[in-house]
Image: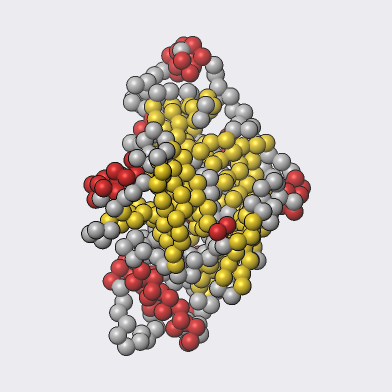
């Protein structure tokens, strides 16, 4: 396994295999499938010479990064570099030269990167490499495409007249600013929680699955975390507090807005501690929030373009405008890919799910529909529009838990939507793939990562009751704890 060798030796080996050319930094026209993952992040499978690597495209990183797991022996290093985080902390890394990186069929040029310690091989391309490119993300197909950075006027025209196949989509063009010291892309975010409000700059991230908020910024705005929500509330008779709620460290929100009418209703942010008193942003906007839209990220043009099918609501009934059709079925999208190892299925729900929902799936082979002793599909907890998830079928734990279900999946060459059913699956809180043995009732799940603590329908029900109590009593904060005015 090729690992660290003197740089001169790496150059001398350039005539072998993939090293027969130096590689190119030109990504124009490149389209890549994202690495299979229940949660969205912009990462793909790649190699560093003969070593398997996860390649992450992260506009929130001012410097490209690499982990020590990519090297068998310590590589030659250059300067020590401090890479800042929005919390005020900084990662201390050693600069190394990265050679032999490939992703898709593209061999990338050599480039400097900061090396940190991790047993896994992860290569992160930061803004020092990504600035010339506009990245287009199709969340329903989980693909990432690259084109040259364009002017803001170009993207404004595309928002007004969407490309073929996106007629009827709603479009939102958001202006980014950049931190003068780090080139972080920033956008203003408004977070509401039971009458308290935070307005601040968040760093846009394309490599983090979960969004984060500064604990100090949240506290100064009057936002409460986890168990703090219960202070001052008189609970109804018989109402029990879920014990797991006491360990919840996140910040629940009623609404998070990126612009008026653009954002997410109900969710949670992971709270992080400030360090050194030099916080540079109020939070970090991860893929779990902006990834409810198809997106174009063009940092050089200071643009984030968000698009998704328009929803037409009549009472509780919702229809979606997609691919020239306006109907309820267009609110659900299923894509799949058959690989040698697994069937990869991606499900997206473009409508709101006030009670959660289940997409039941049928699996097919060239001989027709596969008969199975299991009910299988995707389950979604109560959530806003644009929720999507991707799973390799069968997933790792399914073969041990429900081998008959796993066996049926191994025969499948394709997957189809069977039906939609309101209501989440209590045994699988969150957004998950599920399989249920119809004979025993046993259930196995593979779920997206969640903010610690919000992990059961009992907790979600409790928080909904909490919101109702707030609406009855008004703002429960005592006068001396009213949030400060935003700076």
- Rendering coords of residue 240 (x, y %): 30, 79
Considering the image in quadrants, where does the C terminus appear?
bottom right
- Residue 124 falls left or right of residue 404: right
Q: Position of residue 386 (x, y in %)?
A: 54, 58
For the image, the number of numbered tags is 0
Residue at 39% x, 70% y is 460
Q: Quadrant of residue 53?
A: top left
- In this rendered view, identify the residue nearer to me: 480 or 393: 393
Q: Is residue 402 visible?
A: yes
Residue 221 visible here: no
The color scheme shown is secondary structure
Q: Position of residue 180 (x, y in %)?
A: 63, 47
Where, quadrant-wise, is the N terminus in this rendering? top left
Residue 436 is left or right of residue 52, and the answer is left
Residue 215 vertical position relative to residue 466 in the rendered view, above or below:
above
Q: Would you say 76 lies left or right of 324 here?
A: left
Q: Position of residue 17 (x, y in %)?
A: 46, 15
Displayed quadrant of residue 70: top left
Q: Nearer the viewer, residue 473 or 39?
A: 39
Instruction: Look at 44% across and 64% down and name the residue there.
Output: 421
Q: Is 285 situated above or below 485?
A: above
**Residue pictured at 52% horizontal, 26% vertical:** 105
x 31%, y 63%: residue: 427
Quadrant of the rendered structure where residue 406 is? top left
């Amino acid at each position: 396994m090729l690992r660290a060798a003197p740089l001169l030796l790496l150059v001398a080996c350039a005539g072998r295999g993939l090293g027969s050319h130096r590689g190119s930094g030109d990504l124009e026209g490149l389209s890549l499938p994202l690495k299979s993952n229940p949660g969205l992040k912009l990462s793909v499978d790649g190699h560093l010479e003969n070593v398997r690597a996860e390649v992450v495209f992260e506009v929130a990183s001012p410097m490209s990064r690499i982990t020590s797991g990519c090297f068998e022996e310590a590589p030659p290093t250059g300067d020590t570099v401090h890479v800042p985080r929005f919390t005020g902390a900084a990662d201390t890394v050693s600069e190394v030269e990265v050679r032999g990186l490939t992703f898709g069929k593209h061999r990338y040029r050599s480039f400097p990167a900061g090396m940190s310690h991790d047993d896994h091989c992860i290569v992160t391309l930061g803004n020092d490499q990504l600035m010339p490119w506009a990245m287009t993300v199709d969340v329903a197909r989980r693909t990432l495409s690259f084109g040259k950075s364009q002017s803001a006027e170009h993207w404004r025209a595309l928002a007004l007249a969407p490309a073929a196949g996106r007629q009827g989509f709603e479009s939102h063009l958001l202006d980014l600013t950049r931190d003068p010291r780090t080139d972080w892309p920033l956008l203003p975010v408004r977070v509401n929680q039971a009458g308290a409000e935070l307005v601040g700059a968040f760093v846009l991230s394309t490599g983090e699955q979960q969004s984060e908020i500064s604990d100090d910024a949240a506290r100064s705005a009057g936002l409460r975390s986890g168990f703090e929500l219960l202070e001052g509330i008189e609970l109804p008779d018989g109402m029990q507090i879920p014990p797991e709620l006491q360990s919840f460290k996140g910040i629940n929100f009623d609404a998070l807005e990126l612009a008026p009418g653009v954002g997410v209703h109900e969710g949670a942010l992971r709270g992080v501690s400030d360090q050194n008193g030099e916080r540079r942003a109020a939070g970090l906007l991860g893929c779990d929030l902006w990834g409810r839209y198809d997106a174009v990220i063009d940092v050089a043009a200071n643009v984030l373009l968000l698009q998704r099918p328009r929803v037409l609501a009549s009472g509780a009934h919702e229809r979606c405008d997609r691919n020239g059709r306006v109907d309820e079925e267009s609110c659900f999208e299923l894509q799949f890919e058959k690989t040698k190892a697994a069937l990869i299925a991606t499900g997206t729900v473009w409508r709101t799910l006030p009670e959660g929902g289940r997409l039941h799936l049928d699996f097919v082979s060239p001989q027709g529909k596969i008969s199975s002793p299991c009910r299988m599909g995707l389950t979604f907890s109560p959530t806003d529009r644009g929720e999507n998830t991707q799973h390799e079928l069968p997933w790792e734990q399914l073969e041990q838990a429900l081998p008959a279900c796993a066996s049926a999946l191994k025969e499948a060459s394709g997957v189809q939507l069977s039906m939609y059913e309101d209501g989440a699956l209590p045994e699988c809180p969150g957004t998950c793939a599920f399989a249920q043995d119809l004979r025993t009732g046993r259930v196995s799940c593979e779920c997206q990562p969640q903010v610690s603590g919000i992990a059961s329908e009992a907790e979600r029900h409790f928080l909904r009751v909490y919101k109702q109590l707030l609406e009855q009593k008004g703002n429960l904060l005592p006068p001396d704890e009213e949030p400060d005015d935003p700076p």
